[in-house]
């Protein structure tokens, strides 16, 4: 790959290292043909090399890439904080069950910790996650004219805040199952699934532009697995909804028991699959985001070493 790129570059340069092909500057669109490969754009000062190497991320606009990496940092902070909060809650509840109920002091301390962590999870983390995704999906300057409006980047950018708002709303709603909360849950899962798939697709598109093709493959595999788990969740919720709305009521009592038994088996089977799938995604998703973020950040730092960075 580097050899082929070097050969292509050699063919595009004259004996003095000047560009012999038409290329638009990634910063301003000025044609950099005839300029020194190691020089800078006379219009905006961008390194000519950035415009020569096409799509590769380390040659992309450094300001845009800094915003993208900043967004990924917020997402990673959110994921790490969520993990720490979850572990604290687990340890806290275990300790509380081990300590005799008589020690009121430790119990009130634990309640306070739970309250603080609850506040963090319900108020702070949704905001940091939305902010991170918003910055990650900032439009690339040179993409302005080429990108279709329904791109994975745009879908991720605008659907994620909606998905987060639906999740927060569902968590805050009363726990009793009504038709409204069931439909809310299905809509939330659908929107969340679209956001998750779009995020993986956009990260895969970015990974295609760093010298790590296997990372793109890994992200696309995770995307398939996300769709699979989500399909199970939606299927069981659709069945739940159908049963709840009144399929059972319209069937004679004798067959109703059969339906109920069959439905019960189906439900426990699906729930087991969903539990395993969700656990897998809860581990695989942060790892995939983390690894991709680190590779993109390495590309950003490599880009800074170029002139004009
Ligand atoms: Zn320029």
Image (cartoon, helix red, strand yellow):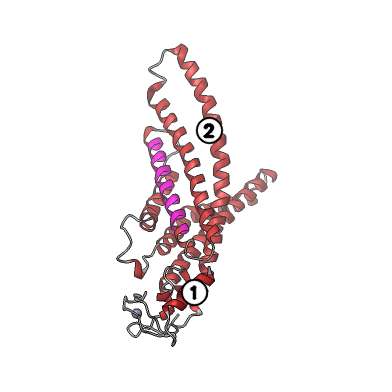
- Residue 28 visible within the image: yes
Assign the C terminus to one quadrant of the image. Answer: bottom left
Residue 194 has which mark? Answer: none
Count of picture labels: 2
User: Does 26 sit above or below residue 132?
Assistant: below
Q: Toward the viewer: 208 or 144?
A: 208
- Residue 100 visible within the image: no
- Chief secondary structure of the magenta portion: helix
Q: Is residue 79 left or right of residue 67?
A: right
Element at label 1: helix
- Name the residue carrying label 1: 7
Residue at the image point whose x is 55% and y is 42% from the top:
277
- In the rendered image, residue 127, in percent from the top left (x then y), is placed at 43, 58
Q: Is residue 190 left or right of residue 4?
A: left
Residue 270 has which mark? Answer: 2
Q: Which residues are magenta?
A: 181-204
Image quadrant of ligand 1 equals bottom left
């Amino acid at each position: 790959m580097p050899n082929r790129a070097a050969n292509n570059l050699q063919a595009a340069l004259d004996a003095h290292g000047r560009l012999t092909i038409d290329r638009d500057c990634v910063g301003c669109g000025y044609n950099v043909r005839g300029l020194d490969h190691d020089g800078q754009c006379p219009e905006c000062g961008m390194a000519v090399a950035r415009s020569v190497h096409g799509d590769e991320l380390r040659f992309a606009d450094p300001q845009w890439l800094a915003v993208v990496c900043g967004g990924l940092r917020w997402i990673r902070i959110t994921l790490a904080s969520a993990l720490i909060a979850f572990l604290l809650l687990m340890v806290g509840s275990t300790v509380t069950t081990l300590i005799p109920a008589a020690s009121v002091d430790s119990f009130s301390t634990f309640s306070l910790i739970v309250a603080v962590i609850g506040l963090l999870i319900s108020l702070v983390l949704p905001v940091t996650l939305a902010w991170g995704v918003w910055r990650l999906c900032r439009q690339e300057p040179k993409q302005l004219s080429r990108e279709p409006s329904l791109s994975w980047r745009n879908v991720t950018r605008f659907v994620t805040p909606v998905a987060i708002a639906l999740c927060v709303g569902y968590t805050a709603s009363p726990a009793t199952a009504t038709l409204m909360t069931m439909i809310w849950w299905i809509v939330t899962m659908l929107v969340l699934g679209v956001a998750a798939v779009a995020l993986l697709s956009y990260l895969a598109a970015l990974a295609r532009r760093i010298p790590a093709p296997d990372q793109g493959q890994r992200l696309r595999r995770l995307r398939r697995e996300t769709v699979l788990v989500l399909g199970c969740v939606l299927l069981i919720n659709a069945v739940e909804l159908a049963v709840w709305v009144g399929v059972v009521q319209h069937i004679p009592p004798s067959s109703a028991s059969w339906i109920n038994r069959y439905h019960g088996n189906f439900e426990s089977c699906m729930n087991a699959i969903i539990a395993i799938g969700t656990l897998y995604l809860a581990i695989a998703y942060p790892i995939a985001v983390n690894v991709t973020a680190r590779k993109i950040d390495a590309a950003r730092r490599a880009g800074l070493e170029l002139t004009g960075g």
